[in-house]
Image: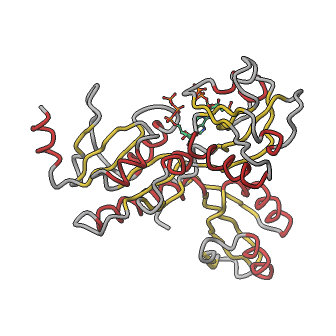
Amino acid sequence: MLDLLSESLKGRCLFAIPKKGRLYEKCLQLLSGADIQFTRSHRLDVCLVRNHNMALVFLPAADIPRFVGEGNVHFGITGQDMVAEADVNGLVSETLQLEFGKCKLQVQVPERGDIKTVEDLVGKKVVTSFEVLAGRYFGELDAKSGKEGVKTKIEYIGGSVEAACALGLADGIVDLVESGETMRAAGLHAIETILTSQAVLIRSNKPADEHDALIERITSRIAGVVAAGKYVLCNYNIPRKVVQEATRVTPGRRAATVSPLDDPDWVAVSSMVLKAQVADVMDKLQAIGASDILVIGLNNCRV
Ligand SMILES: Nc1ncnc2c1ncn2[C@@H]1O[C@H](COP(=O)(O)OP(=O)(O)OP(=O)(O)O)[C@@H](O)[C@H]1O
Ligand SMILES: O=P(O)(O)OC[C@H]1O[C@H](OP(=O)(O)OP(=O)(O)O)[C@H](O)[C@@H]1O
């Protein structure tokens, strides 16, 4: 079976995808939007792509940086926190931020405790799933503390890190925060942010090979899917005499499209607008005198 599998992978571009967890579903949406056609059979973590010289390799998100950096996997999707924790600098490059999986790696301590700052944690015990990042962060604090020979103890646990303080296992923790619910429920609060993270596309820094063009093409398709999720198309009619003021509100990514209407005193404008800003934009356009303001969702695009 292994021979058969490695034979079928020969010469193919390998794309690593988180095999489950928070990032999985969004990754499947990106693959679909990029028209990467495959059928993942049960229990198999490698599957051939039907319409490209490519195979998908389903791996734990934490392992993907190393597989891309050191293995034969050419590119992949994982969290920026995983890339930093894997300490693969120089072996992989971040090629695209994917706008999902957003979270922060934060130092957290009991809300009602004596520890108020990260300096108060120097020499004490910190529990985390991010040993490399926490070790580096507190190593720098130890060095700056001026306390000769004092070293903050960093201990690894794989999950439920937030329970460590209540159980007397630690004075503080370093853990991911997304909504903050887990942290607050555990009676903790954040006193420092070590890094912010989101899902990213990463690629190997190995010399270019025959797969470079395909990687560029897939990256461009995924960038289009990400942009389509960030932007909407805003169409509206505006009196010609205030079109300059209106296109300052909707400048577009390169420029707004302005088209004449049958009525010489009016023009039609079409422009890409950030989804997060569209309500304010519509208010401003209405105040300037725009009418028939339409907001159209984008299924896909190329930017
Ligand atoms: N609240 C969160 N907890 C953990 N990871 C998060 C969170 N929010 C975003 N992420 C991102 O998801 C990545 C973890 O995904 P991964 O699939 O490895 O773990 P998971 O979603 O906790 O699933 P599992 O329970 O199988 O470990 C993190 O590296 C981070 O980039
Ligand atoms: O800010 P929130 O939205 O509450 O998310 C943060 C929590 O999510 C993750 O735990 P996960 O749910 O993966 O369980 P785990 O503790 O077993 O890692 C992470 O370790 C935090 O505990």
Rendered residue at 73%/40% (across/down): 107
Tell me: 125 left or right of 10: right
Tell me: 87 left or right of 282: left
Image x and y of residue 120, in percent: 83, 40
Tell me: 257 left or right of 282: left
Between 260 and 271, the one lying in front of the other is: 271
Q: Note whether 20 is above or below 253 in the view shown.
A: above
Q: Note whether 130 is above or below 231 in the view shown.
A: above
Where's ligand 1: which quadrant? Answer: top right
Between 154 and 96, the one lying in front of the other is: 154
Figure quadrant of the N terminus: top left
Which color mode does the image show? secondary structure
Image x and y of residue 71, in percent: 30, 50
Task: Identify the image quadrant of residue 214.
Answer: bottom left
Image x and y of residue 291, in percent: 76, 63
Image x and y of residue 160, in percent: 62, 23
Count of numbered circles on the image: 0
Rendered residue at 70%/42% (across/down): 151
Rendered residue at 28%/25% (across/down): 42
Furthest residue to the top? Answer: 167
Rendered residue at 63%/68% (across/down): 271
Tell me: 300 left or right of 251: left
Between 219 and 206, the one lying in front of the other is: 206
